[in-house]
Image: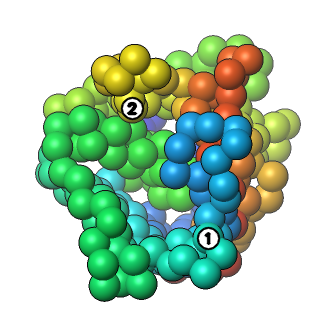
Amino acid sequence: MNENISPLAKKFINNSIKNGTKIPKTAILDIEGKMKTKIDETAPWNDISSKEILSKDGFVWKAELKSGPLVLKGADYYFENNSEINFALYGLIPVVKESNKDITKSAIGRLAIELMVWNPWAVFMDKNNEFKDVDSETFSVSFEIDGEPVTVYLKIDENGCLKEVYMNRWNKLENGLYGYIPFGGTVSDHLENNGLKIAKTLNVGWNYGTGFYVETFYFNVTAAEFY
């Protein structure tokens, strides 16, 4: 473990892994929940059933989204500065297929924040990463993903359990251009498996911490395996 981590970061990571537990490289998660495809309070919710493979090198998220009788099947992925979103109606009729520098930059932010909630241990092992206590409950983690600098903020309770997570993440602005938008949310439950503890239930969205916050994701991890 990185010996230079801050006191709050140490409290968090010690709470997330029991002594003697092998530090995993990869998490495989079953995730259910809901999501909106637009940053809009009036946008409909889509039911999610998905599986994700997550490591510090990237992720693959295979999902099925349902809204009434409509079903979208597809996947998102990020690996080595490459990312794609690819979904089709009933898995047959293409609806979304996007891959560009902005999609990739946003995916890097997604990877950063998901590592903190579901697979933080490799990040905490890296001696090049920087940890700072911000206040009595909050610390920041700054690191790079394929050359892109990221900083994620984590708020913990008195036992070290994660309560909130947030960052500035790349996405399309209201004017149609791209820029950084506050993104994050709250953790209301945790899942433990073989000496490892991760966030189980999350409510997250865009413009987090502002008066314009729109919750766009509700995630519930129903199963987790680590390798």
| x 17%, y 32%: residue | 147
What colour scheme does the image use? rainbow
Q: Estimate the x, y position of residue 34 in percent, counting from the top left.
A: 66, 62
Circle 1 SS class: strand
Check disc 1 and give the amino acid type. Answer: Ser
Q: Which mark is residue 67?
A: 1
Q: Position of residue 163 (x, y in %)?
A: 75, 41
User: Which quarter of the rendered picture does the C terminus lie within?
Assistant: bottom left
Element carrying mark 2: strand
Relative image position of residue 65 (x, y in whole percent): 53, 72
Compare residues 120 and 95 and report the one nearer the observer. 95
Q: Judge depth for marks 2 and 1 and give the one in front.
A: 1
Q: Amino acid at mark 2?
A: Asn
Q: Kindly identify which residue carries mark 2.
A: 171
Look at the picture and state if 202 lies above or below 224: above
Residue at image x 81%, y 44%? 159
